[in-house]
């Protein structure tokens, strides 16, 4: 007896095909919804990434300026102290930016990650 995937009566076959199509559409809907939520979650992390990058650059520049200022004769240490403190504050801002986006990104352990994006 050959395999017949659907019933032979038209009404039952129509119901089976409608059920299969409904299932495919239902799965597609949830995949589309999951992808949309994933994209929105990654968008929430973007301001934190920018804050971390900008503040990290400022912190590095101020740390270098503090090291350079400490070489000034007689007043170098006093001059370097506030510059280094500003660099530390900028480093704290970079850490705040990192903590803002890293929980969002931490869950991204997908199979493939091209250009800083995860795809499941």
Image (cartoon, rainbow, N blue to C red):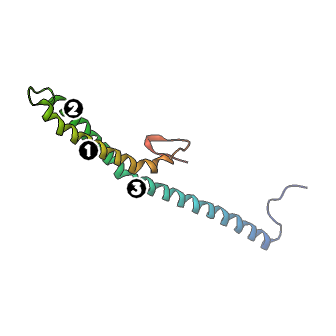
Q: Residue at x 75, y 67 (%)?
A: 16
In the rendered image, residue 13, in percent from the top left (x then y), is placed at 78, 68
Question: Which corner quadrant holds the N terminus?
Answer: bottom right
Number of other residues with Cα within 10 Å of mark 2, as a class: few under 14, some 14 to 19, many 20 or more: some
Q: Which residue is mark 2?
A: 64
Name the front one of labels 1 and 2.
1
- Location of mark 3 (residue): 44
- Could you tell which of marks 3 and 1 lies nearer the N-terminus? 3
Q: Residue furthest bottom?
A: 11
> Circle 1 sits on which residue?
89
Front position among marks 3 and 2:
2
How far apart are labels 1 and 2 at the CA level?
14 Å
Secondary structure state at the residue bearing disc 2: helix
The residues bearing labels 3 and 1 have C-alpha atoms spaced at a distance of: 24 Å
Q: Position of residue 72 (x, y in %)?
A: 10, 27
How packed mark 1 is, by other alpha carbons closer than 10 Å (few <14, some 14-19, many 20 or more), is some
Foreground: 52 or 17? 52
In which image quadrant can residue 91 be found? top left
Q: Residue 45 has which mark?
A: none
Q: Quadrant of residue 8?
A: bottom right
């Amino acid at each position: 007896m050959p395999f017949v995937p659907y019933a032979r009566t038209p009404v039952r076959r129509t119901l089976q095909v409608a059920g299969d199509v409904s299932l495919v559409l239902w799965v597609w809907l949830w995949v589309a919804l999951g992808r949309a939520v994933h994209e929105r979650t990654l968008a929430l992390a973007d301001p934190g990434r920018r804050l971390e990058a900008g503040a990290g650059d400022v912190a590095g520049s101020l740390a270098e300026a503090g090291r350079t200022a400490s070489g000034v004769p007689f007043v170098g240490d006093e001059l370097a102290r506030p510059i280094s403190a500003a660099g530390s504050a900028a480093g704290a801002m970079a850490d705040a930016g990192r903590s803002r986006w890293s929980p969002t990104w931490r869950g991204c352990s997908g199979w493939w990650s091209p250009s800083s994006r995860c795809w499941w």
